[in-house]
Image: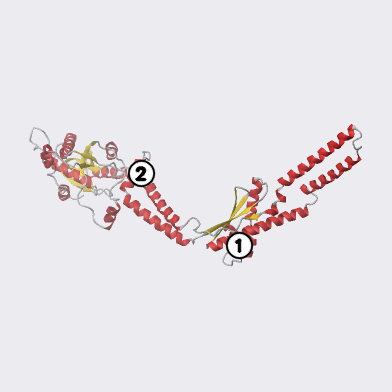
Amino acid sequence: MSEDTIRLVTLGRILRRRRRLLALLVVLGALAGYGTSLLFPPRYTASASVLLPGQWEERGLLTQAEIASSSTVVDRAAASLRWTDVSRAELRDRVRAKVTDGNVIRISGTADTPARAQRLSDQVAQQFVAFAGRIAGDSSDTDEVSGPQALRQQVTTTNRRISELAEAADPGRTVESVQARTQLEQLRTALQEAMKKLDEADPASNRTGMVVMGPAPRPTGEAPPTRIQLVAAGAVLFLLLGIVGHLVAARADRRPRTGPEIAAALGTVPLGTVDVPTGRHGPKRRGARARLRRLLGTDTRWDVPVPRTTADGAGLRLRYRRVYTRLRDRLPAPGGVLVLVPEGDASARHAAGRLAAEAGSAPSPGSANGRHPLLRVVEVPVARPLVPDRGDEAGALVVLGAGNWTEEELAGLAGACADAGHEVVGVVLAGPVRLRGKRSAGHRGATAGDEAVPDTAAPALAARGRTTGGGA
C-alpha cells in the first residue's frame, strides 16, 4: 500500500470496511459544526442599489464603489444611526460595495437582525449620494477657471469672435467673402458639436444626479455561513479527515507483507503460505477496548485484500502437507521443531495448530518415508520476545500473518531465537480464505478429515509447549 497509487477502489474499500468509524466521525463533525454555530450569532445582509446616470468608465465606477464603503461615508451613516452597541470600526467591516451591470453600485450591510441590516444599507446609500454630490459641487466652485469649465469659456469667447469676424466680412459682394463666412460657420458648428460631446462624456456633470433605487429589501434568511452550512461543513470535514488519515497511515506503513520480505527480516527462507478459514481464529478478545473495536469495525484491517474463496477443505489440507514436507527437508538434523507464533496473531495460532496436527498424523519415524518431526507450538510476545532454550529441537519455525509486524519486531524475534540457540529454518505465512457454502459429495471425506482439528488444538499445544519448554 505504501507504494501504490491511490485509486477509487482504495477509497471504496475504506468506505466499506470503515463505514461505522466514518459514520461516527460524521456525527462528531456535525456536532462540532453545530457547536461552532452557537459561538457565532446569526447575521443578516441587506443590499441597496445606487444608479449613476451618464457614461462612466470602469475605473471611475470602481472609484465610486470605494468611496461608498469608505470610512467617511460609513462614519456619517453611523452618526445618523446612533447605535451604541456597535462601534464605527465594526460597522466598516460590515459594509461592502461592488459594481454591477448598468452603472449600478450595490451597497450591502450586515447586522444581527433583518431590520438593522435594512437600515444600515439604506443609510449608507443615502450618505454616499449626499457625499458624492457635495464633492461634485465643491469641485465646480473651486475650479471655475480650470479644466472643462475653462474650456467652455474659451469656446464661448471663440464663438463670439467668429460672429464678429463674420459681420466684419464683406457680406456677399465677393467670392472670397462668401467662402470666409462659410468657413466661419463650419468652424462654429464643429465647436458646438465638440462641446456637446464633452458634456456627454464628462461624468462630473452627472455626479449630482445619483439616485438610490428604492429602499433595501428586508432579508428573509441568514447570511452565510448558516447553521445548516456549518453542520454540513463539519460533517464533510471530519469525513475527509478520516479518509485522509487512513490513507496517510497506509502510506506510512512499512511493515513487510510478502513472504520474501518477511523471510529477509527473519534471516531465513519462506516455506509457503497456508490458508485459514475466516471466522475461526480462536476466542474473541474481551474488555471494553476490544468491544469498542468490534463495534467500530477496527478490529480487522482495511488495507488487506479480500479473502479469496476456496472450494473446500481438501485444498487447505494439501497446502499444510506441502509446507510440512518442505519443513522436514529443511531440517539440518533429526529432532522436533519449535513453532513460534506471535502473541495475538489468531490466524497464525490456528495455522500452527493445523501444522502440529498434520505432524501428529504423519507416518512414524521408522517408516520408509524418513524423518517426521513433531512440532511444539509456543506463543511469543513480540514486544519483548523470550524463546525457550534449545532442547532436542532441530530448529525453529515462525508462523505469522502477513503485514502485522514491523521489520524491527521480526528482527527482535530472530534475535531471541539466536539467543536461545535455535536456528530459524523457515517462515510460514497464514492467509485467510472463505469456504464455499455448498460442497460436493466427493469432497466430504476430505473435508471431514480437515475439520478433525478444532480451533482449540492450537491453544492446547501452545500450553503444552509452555509447560515442557520452561515458559515463553
First of labels 2, 1 by sequence position: 2
Report the residue marked by disc 2: 11
Image position of 226 (left or right of 200): left
* Image position of 334 with respect to 96: above or below: above
Colour scheme used in the picture? secondary structure
Can you give x and y, in whole percent of width and height, for residue 387 in the image? 22, 47
Image position of 451 (left or right of 115): left
Can you give x and y, in whole percent of width and height, for residue 232 in the image? 42, 54
Can you give x and y, in whole percent of width and height, for residue 82 in the image? 61, 66
Q: Give the residue type at disc 1.
A: Arg
- Say whether residue 425 is visible: no
Q: Secondary structure at mark 1?
A: helix
Image quarter of the N terminus: top left
For residue 324, which quarter of the picture?
Answer: top left
Q: Nearer the viewer, residue 139 or 317?
A: 139
* Image position of 288 with respect to 313: above or below: below
The residue drawn where x is 37% and y is 43% is 251
Report the residue marked by disc 1: 88
Q: Nearer the viewer, residue 409 or 114?
A: 114
For residue 441, which quarter of the picture?
Answer: top left
Q: Give the residue type at disc 2.
A: Leu
Image position of 42 (left or right of 387): right
Q: Secondary structure at mark 2?
A: helix
Q: Is the residue marked by circle 2 packed among few (<14), some (14-19), or many (20+) residues within 10 Å?
A: some
Q: Mark 2 to mark 1: distance in Å?
A: 51 Å
The residue drawn where x is 38% and y is 56% is 28
Q: In the image as oriented, which residue stretches furthest toward the bottom?
A: 84
- Say whether residue 26 is visible: yes
Give yes or no for contact between labels 2 and 1 (Cβ–Cβ under 8 Å). no
